[in-house]
Image (spheres, rainbow, N blue to C red):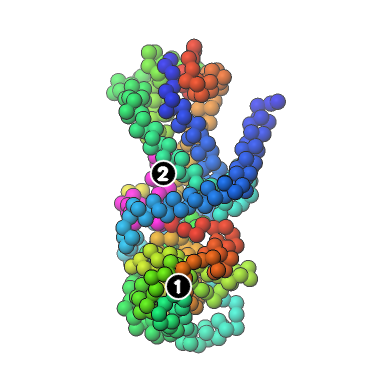
């Protein structure tokens, strides 16, 4: 056999072996375990409340790219747009003592945090913007979050490919000081393409965690009964890692 | 020519498997956003310093476009790659492989000496004298072990948003997250180039003996490391 053919055959065998490993039970559990090792290493190496870098105004990128859903294709949402989101509500439910339904007005009256941070997409690009909104921790504490809550699920108005968008984080990221419910971007009301009127900022994780068009936050002890059980739209339908800090 | 010690042989093959999977899954990840930027941010082609070609399926893991599976492989193989390199460095410093075989001396950096080395290499005369490796080999192995491979780990960490708060200075030293991503890409091709030359030199210096030596430690009669 010619050397080139041999190398090509070896390459094909190697890639074939990789997909065999990925499809096997041990292989796939190893692949998902690795994600957990990274999460544990990240948490071990930095303080739980350690902040990500905040930038100066001069560092803000000229536009903030909209990605994934850039609007919500429902009559209800168009109605909200026409009303300037005056009747938008954010539900707080699940393992909390006082379930709440908050208007944008109520959210704006809470103590606000403004942060200029870098947004990193799983695809590889980054943009910098200035976000304003109340800390998620403030709302969870006001709602009386239970000790049994392990995850916070973010429900959204938008859908991708007919499936409702949702995401989730554990309590470490939920209570992080830079985890805010943003209603402003660069000093303006949140644009539609960036998730109007409310979106999450989960600064230690990639962009797909930053749920847009936010309608509800739900505290739960387990993700098994949420969606298809993987903890998010991308996790359920496209096999993305639940921990998006890598 | 001295034998390859066990730590070198084990690491060599572990590293080969890790680097091949990391490289090929990395090409798949590159296909997700084929533009590279300098600085902290960048998201559209007009801001890019390089538009990367799309890598075909036969060059990627998996062999079709899947950012999720490619990231699974990349994230898994980062562990044996990084831990293996760390153990290799500890072993090299402890067993004196680094001081004895890889360190260069001032005398060797003389332009005349380098020129002579290059000419000898181009004539395919690989004269080592009494040392295990000649100057060019020390340069090649030294820059791969000391710059390119660790550089991949540090730039990889700098790209991870969950790691950034543990060492914010790392992103700054590298010139921003998008610069770190660009360097990650450039170094990956540096490792590819080294590997290509390495394989050619192995083929030119008796591949059977070379490969056997890297497996068993072996006694090579002629030639040296490639």
Tag 2: Cα neighbours inside 10 Å, few (<14), some, or many (≥20)?
some
Question: What kind of element bears circle 2?
Answer: helix
Q: Is residue A54 left or right of residue A202?
A: left
The image quarter containing residue B142 is top left
On the question of residue B102 being in view, the answer is yes
The residue under the point 31% across, 78% down is A111
- What mark, if any, has residue A219 been given in the picture? 1
Q: Which residue is mark 2?
A: B153
Question: What kind of element bears circle 1?
Answer: strand
- What mark, if any, has residue A91 been given in the picture? none
Q: Is residue B72 left or right of residue B56?
A: left
**Along the viewing direction, whichever of B24 and B83 lies nearer the viewer:** B83
Spatial CA span between label 1 and label 2: 36 Å
Tag 1: Cα neighbours inside 10 Å, few (<14), some, or many (≥20)?
many
Please provide the residue range marked out in magenta. Answer: B148-171
Tell me the chain of label 1: A
**Along the viewing direction, whichever of A115 and A47 lies nearer the viewer:** A47
The answer to whether dots 1 and 2 both sit on one chain is: no
Confirm whether the magenta stretch covers residue A194: no
Q: Report the residue that reaches farthest toward the front.
A: A148
Asked if the residue under mark 2 is in contact with the one under mark 1, i.e. CB atoms within 8 Å, the reply is: no
Confirm whether the magenta stretch covers residue B164: yes
**Along the viewing direction, whichever of B75 and B108 lies nearer the viewer:** B75
The residue under the point 51% across, 74% down is A155
Q: x, y (%) of residue A118?
A: 40, 62
């Amino acid at each position: 056999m010619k050397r080139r053919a041999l190398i090509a055959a070896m390459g094909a065998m190697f890639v074939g072996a990789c997909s065999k490993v990925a499809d096997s039970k041990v292989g796939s559990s190893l692949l998902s375990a690795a994600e957990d090792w990274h999460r544990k290493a990240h948490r071990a190496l930095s303080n739980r409340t350690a902040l990500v870098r905040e930038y100066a105004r001069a560092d803000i990128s000229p536009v903030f790219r909209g990605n994934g859903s850039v609007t919500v294709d429902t009559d209800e949402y168009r109605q909200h747009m026409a009303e300037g989101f005056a009747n938008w509500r954010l539900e707080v439910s699940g393992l909390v003592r006082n379930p709440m339904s908050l208007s944008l007005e109520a959210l704006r009256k809470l103590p606000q945090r403004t942060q200029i941070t870098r947004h990193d997409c799983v695809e590889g690009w980054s943009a910098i913007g200035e976000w304003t909104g109340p800390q998620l921790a403030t709302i969870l504490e006001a709602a009386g979050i239970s000790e049994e809550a392990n995850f916070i699920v973010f429900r959204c108005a938008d859908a991708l490919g007919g499936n409702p968008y949702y995401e989730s984080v554990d309590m470490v990221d939920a209570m992080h000081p830079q985890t805010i419910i943003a209603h402003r971007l660069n000093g303006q009301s949140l644009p539609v393409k960036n998730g109007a009127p409310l979106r999450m900022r989960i600064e230690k994780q990639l962009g797909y965690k930053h749920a847009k068009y936010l309608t509800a936050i739900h505290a739960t002890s387990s993700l098994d009964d949420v969606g298809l059980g993987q903890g998010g739209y991308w996790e359920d339908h496209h096999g993305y890692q639940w921990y998006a800090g890598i | 020519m001295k034998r390859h010690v066990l730590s070198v042989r084990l690491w060599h093959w572990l590293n080969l498997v890790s680097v091949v999977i990391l490289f090929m899954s990395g090409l798949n990840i590159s296909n997700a956003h084929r533009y590279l930027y300098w600085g902290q941010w960048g998201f559209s082609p007009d801001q890019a310093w390089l538009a990367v070609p799309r890598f075909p399926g036969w060059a990627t893991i998996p062999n079709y476009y899947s950012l999720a599976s490619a990231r699974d492989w990349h994230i898994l193989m980062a562990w044996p790659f990084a831990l293996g390199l760390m153990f290799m460095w500890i072993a090299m410093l402890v067993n004196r492989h680094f001081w004895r075989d890889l360190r260069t001396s001032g005398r060797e950096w003389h332009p005349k000496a380098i020129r002579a080395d290059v000419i000898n290499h181009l004539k395919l005369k690989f004269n080592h004298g009494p040392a295990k490796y000649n100057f060019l080999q020390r340069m090649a192995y030294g820059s791969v072990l000391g710059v390119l491979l660790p550089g991949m780990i540090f730039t990889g960490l700098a790209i991870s948003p969950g790691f950034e708060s543990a060492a914010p200075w790392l992103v700054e030293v590298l010139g921003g997250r998008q610069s770190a991503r660009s360097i990650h890409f450039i170094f990956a091709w540096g490792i590819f180039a080294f590997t290509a030359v390495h394989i050619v030199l192995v083929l030119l210096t008796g591949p059977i003996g070379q490969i056997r030596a890297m497996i068993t430690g072996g006694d090579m009669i002629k030639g040296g490391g490639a």
